[in-house]
Image (tube, grey):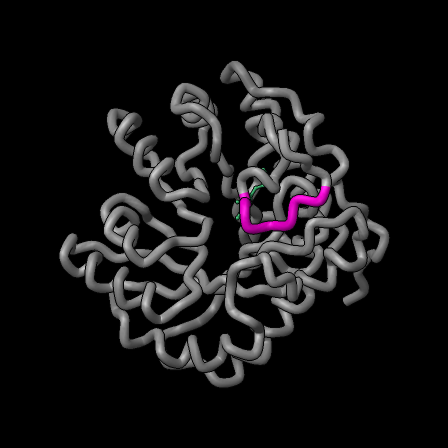
Amino acid sequence: MTLPDDTPTRHAQHGLYPEALTVPDFERNLAAVQARIAAACRRAGRDPAGVRLLPVSKTKPASSLRLAHAAGCRMLGENKVQEAHGKWQALQDLGDLQWSVIGHLQTNKARLVARFASEFQALDSLRLAEALERRLQAEGRSLDVFVQVNTSGEASKYGLAPEQVSDFIQALPAFPALRVRGLMTLALFSSDAERVRQCFVRLRQLRARLRQDLPTGLALDELSMGMSGDFEIAIEEGATVVRVGQAIFGARPLPDSHYWPDQPRPQETPA
Ligand SMILES: *Cc1c(COP(=O)(O)O)cnc(C)c1O
């Protein structure tokens, strides 16, 4: 398969996405993202039905999530479990809204995830798998999980190193409440499209290697990779889930280093 090597990142556009304030705003933004997904699929010779759009609502108020729901969103991604849990409580009346927790989770917060989330995309330790399993059993629930992989090599990013993933996956059948769906990564945050692409290539190639020796019943169908600034490149490299916040909800008021406090924050000076 020949893939284009010149799809740019759009990280420079962060901050330019206008805030979605009405249901038609959300409908328009969702349609625009779906059109970008379809175009990326065409370039890669893929069926757009093979790419799920996960809208990411972190930092946005519950009122804004209601508008997204009215515009058709039925699953929302949040990176902080306490924020997600609060919104879940505030939006219980919607009934059919599901939650995907996409950010690092401390073991002592596994209980919250087990209570309300349908999906967890940042599994990165056996201790956490054990805690989730125990809490899920107590709730009588199960959870779709993605193993987070650090494909950028940045010390600031969460996730297992690629060479640790094989042993980790072999241990997961011990946790029957966890339905292992695939791998997740955050690419390097860069305007250098080629280096961003390499992160996605690494995840795809890792999955291909893992698939040669998977425990029974485990398929690793999903690759969750790509966000507002780079999801087209991720799709060209095989993403089946793209996690898109700002292009749907509007820019977040502060730079990403604020929401991912463990990342280096070179541009910020103390107030
Ligand atoms: C915030 C976030 C996203 C979405 O980023 P946008 O720039 O808003 O599209 C994707 N994945 C994770 C893990 C996130 O925390």
Q: In the figure, is residue 98 to the left or right of 247?
A: left
Residue 210 horizontal/vertical position (percent): 53, 79
Residue 176 horizontal/vertical position (percent): 26, 69
Q: Residue at x 41, y 61 (%)?
A: 123
Whether residue 142 is visible to the viewer of this picture, yes or no, is yes
Q: Please provide the residue range marked out in magenta.
A: 260-266
Of all residues, the one furthest to the bottom in this rendering is: 213
> From what the image shows, is residue 127 above or below residue 96?
below
> From what the image shows, is residue 170 above or below residue 78?
below
Residue 56 horizontal/vertical position (percent): 50, 38
Of all residues, the one furthest to the front in this rendering is: 270
Quarter of the figure with the N terminus: bottom right
Q: Main secondary structure of the magenta part?
A: loop
Q: Residue at x 32, y 46 (%)?
A: 117
Q: Residue at x 69, y 47 (%)?
A: 230
Residue 68 horizontal/vertical position (percent): 46, 26
| Quarter of the figure with residue 80 | top left
Q: In the figure, is residue 4 to the left or right of 17?
A: right
Q: Residue at x 59, y 55 (%)?
A: 186
Is residue 3 on the magenta stretch? no
| Quarter of the figure with residue 116 | top left
Whether residue 247 is visible to the viewer of this picture, yes or no, is no
Quarter of the figure with the C terminus: top right
Of all residues, the one furthest to the right in this rendering is: 6
Is residue 265 on the magenta stretch? yes
